[in-house]
Amino acid sequence: MSLRKGSKVWVPDRDFAWLPAEVLESSNKQLRVQTDSGNKIIVIAPEKIFPRDADEDEHGGVEDMTRLAYLNEPGVLYNIRRRYALNDIYTYTGSILIAVNPFTKLPHLYNNHMMEQYKGAQFGELRSILIAVNPFTKLPHLYNNHMMEQYKGAPFGELSPHVFAVADASYRAMMNEGRSQSILVSGESGAGKTETTKLIMQYLTFVGGRAVSDDRTVEQQVLESNPLLEAFGNARTSRNDNSR
Ligand SMILES: Nc1ncnc2c1ncn2[C@@H]1O[C@H](COP(=O)(O)OP(=O)(O)OP(=O)(O)O)[C@@H](O)[C@H]1O
């Protein structure tokens, strides 16, 4: 990592975890940096800091963190925090959805209108990784007008990150490929795993409709199984009073 005068960096901080800063002076063993708020000058070893993308200051956070120039801890935390401040609680990292517990009701995120929007919407294109290999020759057929027409208006990660997008992608894959799908919901106690799982089930019941052999809707069947799920362990943790 080459850090010279003017490089943007993250420095560790006891209160805020990480603070944005800029390098004032650099040598092999030590850096002198100034925090962006301007009130701290810190002398620190280069291995204790992380590089920061100058563009990060200008936007309200990226929807997919694979687009961050530096995928390091401070960059990830800062991006999630920026989005959270705007009530954007969902963020992708590739095909992984990160959900931040809002500790408040956000009903506009989960109403029928949102379910309609995510039904069958594109999920996947945005998460492709582009690896370019230099062909060391001209390939004009790749870049002609016909090719441009083909790509014009083609869907590309149409909608904002959302738990419905993940549920919809799994549902489509199950229907199209005829294979079971798994969604792993992970997080510490109180992170919102149960809420997220309920939202996934709510969406699946919305797109799934009703089995011919059963008078009950899928939603009724899932809801009827809920008390059973809740009966398995119903403890409290220091982070969550309804832990299960
Ligand atoms: N998307 C959300 N919208 C609104 N409130 C939420 C959301 N996610 C979580 N919460 C709130 O946070 C509380 C704790 O979430 P939840 O029970 O889902 O956590 P958990 O990860 O399943 O925890 P544990 O591992 O302890 O069971 C919920 O009861 C709810 O009040």
Image (cartoon, grey):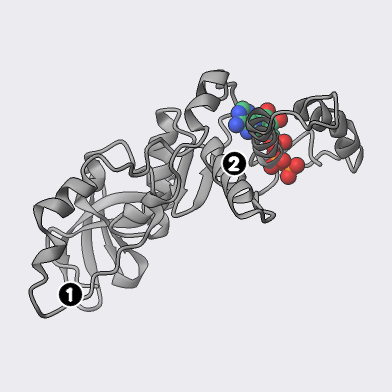
Left or right of 44 in this view: 127 = right
The numbered disc on residue 221 is none
The numbered disc on residue 27 is 1
Secondary element at tag 1: loop
**Identity, as a three-letter code, of the amino acid under mark 1:** Ser
Using the image as rendered, state which of residue 144 and residue 240 is in the foreground. Answer: 144
In the rendered structure, which disc, 2 or 1, sits on the residue that comes first in sequence?
A: 1
Left or right of 124 in this view: 221 = right
Report x, y in % for residue 44. 30, 66
Residue at 64% x, 51% y: name it.
Answer: 183
Mark 1 C-beta to ligand 1 under 8 Å: no
Report x, y in % for residue 171. 61, 43
The numbered disc on residue 167 is 2
Residue at 71% x, 38% y: name it.
Answer: 194
**Identity, as a three-letter code, of the amino acid under mark 2:** Ala
Query: In the rendered view, would you say 232 is above or below 53?
Result: above
Using the image as rendered, state which of residue 228 and residue 123 is in the foreground. Answer: 123
Residue at 29% x, 70% y: name it.
Answer: 46
Using the image as rendered, state which of residue 43 and residue 89 is in the foreground. Answer: 89
How packed mark 2 is, by other alpha carbons closer than 10 Å (few <14, some 14-19, many 20 or more), is many
Using the image as rendered, state which of residue 56 and residue 158 is in the foreground. Answer: 158
Query: In the rendered view, would you say 100 is above or below 137?
Result: above
Residue 82 lies in what quarter of the image? Answer: top left
The answer to whether one can see residue 136 in this image is yes
